[in-house]
Each structure stands twice: as structure tokens, then as C-alpha cells.
Image: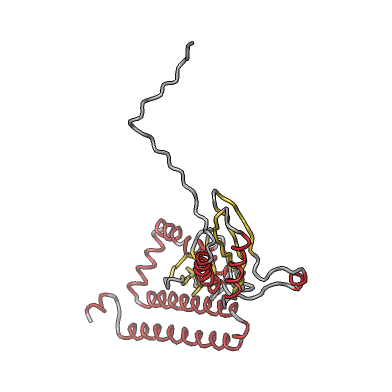
Amino acid sequence: MSFLQTLGMDLLVLLKIVGIVAAAWLVERIMYLVLRRGYARRKAKGRDEFTQYRFLRNAVRTVVVVAAFFAVIYTIPSLRSFAFTLFAGAGLLVAILGFAAQKAFSDIISGIFIVSFKPFRVGDVIQAGEQGLFGTVEDINLRHTTILTFENRRVVIPNSILSEERIVNSSIRDEATCQFVEIPVAIDADLEHARRIIQEESLAHPAQFDRRTAEELAAGEPEVPVRLVSITDATALMRAYVWAKDPVTARLMRYDLNERILKRMKLEQVPVGVPLRYFVQRNPYAPAVHHGDQTE
């Protein structure tokens, strides 16, 4: 009791604090049920509503916690007077706190923009940055976005940073993915033989499907085009354009095809391209050669 008296609290104040915490919990639960029921009625519309639901749920929880915190401070007389004195007389501290909060406000505004303009949604498969993170968006809240990578690691990125990155979204319209399967073959290999092997193995893969348009079918375009895309040193790079239903399946399909095509080429004796490397070694015991004026 002496500790409570030091804080300027009595039983009535303690009951008020308990009431504030209980009311905050009740408001948070009610808002959670309202949002969940509203989302359940519109669930058929897909990821847009689910992203808004998760963002609003996190925002409501944050607002309720902050409001309850300040209500508790205002209820305790000693803390209330201390807070008034601190913020009324310490303008420099307020300025420092305001400067420190700029990053937080930037994250909040960026989060609102992300939810409003929908560059990505919860459940989308994205890549952030040129050579950056690749994974599934798991959650978006006021401060940050959580991305679940394919190594089952959760990466938390502030919204302000993510909003400045170049985002490659593989799910925003159509998840079907054209996967490049690139096989280097020797420059003197039978390219038609290599093309036939790549096409046959690609067509035999269960994840591959025909994506050709009516115009391409009428023009006789192959289901899996294979083209020679580059020639470097003694290597000719063959590229197959293979379609899968989503980016994850496409990536796994590429790994399978790399192995299948390599085994098939080895079986049918089609040489795989290996880059040439030239090494120059100097003989330290060779006599030095002096280049000077020659006289007759």
C-alpha cells in the first residue's frame, strides 16, 4: 500500500485503471469481431479485402493500446502531473520526440498508401528490389510489412523502405508464369538435337501447360519455344519458354528441367557448353629478351 500511496493511487484509482484495461480489451474484441464478420461477408472478392481487414485490425489494436496507455497515465495523479510538467516545460524534449517520430509517421503513411493503391496484397508473391527479397506477403500493419520467404524465414521491412523499392508482383493480376529454362550447349553441338531434347523434356513435365493464343496456334508456334539467345566463347545458350500456373511452381519446374535435360543430353551425347579459360604462365628461368636497336 505504501508503494501505491507513493504513486498517489488509492483503491478507486486502481479500480479505474482496471476498468480502462478491461474497456480497451472489450473494444478491441468488438472491433475485431465486427471486422471479421464484415470480411466474411465479402471473402469471395479475394485478397484486396483481406489485406484491408488485416491492416485495419492491426491499426485498431494499435490505437486502442495507445489510447489505454494515455488514459492510465491521466488517471494516476502523480503521473498526470509529471506528464503535464514534462510536456509543458520541456520544449526541447518535445522537439526531439517529434523528430524521432518522423520515421514512425512515415511508415504509417506509407502503410496507408500501400493498402490504398495496392501495389501488393497479403498473399501475393513479390520480389522487393533489383536482386532483393523473394517471398509471400504475410502481413501488413501500421509500421511494417512481413514477408515469408521460401526458406520459411519472416523478414520484417518498414513500410517507408518498402514503398521506395521496385516491387515485382507475380500475383497481382495473373499468377501464370513464363519460366526461362536456360541450357548452355557446346558451340559445335547439333543445335537442332539439343532443341528437340529441351522441348521434349519440357512438354513431358507435369507442371507445364499450353499458354498459346489463338493467333499463335494458327501461326504454328511451338508449345515450348526454344531459342538461341547468346553465344559466348565456346558456349551457345539455349532458352526454353515454359509456362507454369504460379511462380513457385515455375521455379521448382525449372530445377527439375535442369536435371532432366542434363541427364538426357549426357545420355544422347550432346555436349554441354563449358566456358573456356586461358592461363598464361611465365617461365622464371627463361632468359630475358631485350628489345633494342638492331645494327647491321
Query: Residue at coordinates 34% horizontally, 86% vertically from top-left?
Result: 15
User: Quick one: which residue is furthest to the top in this view?
Assistant: 296
Question: In which quadrant of the rendered view does residue 225 lie?
Answer: bottom right
Decide: is 76 above or below 155.
below
Left or right: residue 15 versus residue 264 is left
Task: Depth check: give the residue in front, 80 or 23.
Answer: 23
Task: Depth check: give the residue in front, 228 or 93.
Answer: 228
Decide: is 43 above or below 121.
below
Left or right: residue 216 versus residue 74 is right
Query: Residue at coordinates 73% horizontally, 72% vertically from top-left?
Result: 213
| Residue 17, image x, y percentages | 36, 82
Question: In which quadrant of the rendered view does residue 96 lie?
Answer: bottom left
Left or right: residue 141 versus residue 192 is left
| Residue 34, image x, y percentages | 54, 87
| Residue 136, image x, y percentages | 51, 72
User: Quick one: which residue is furthest to the left in this view?
Assistant: 2
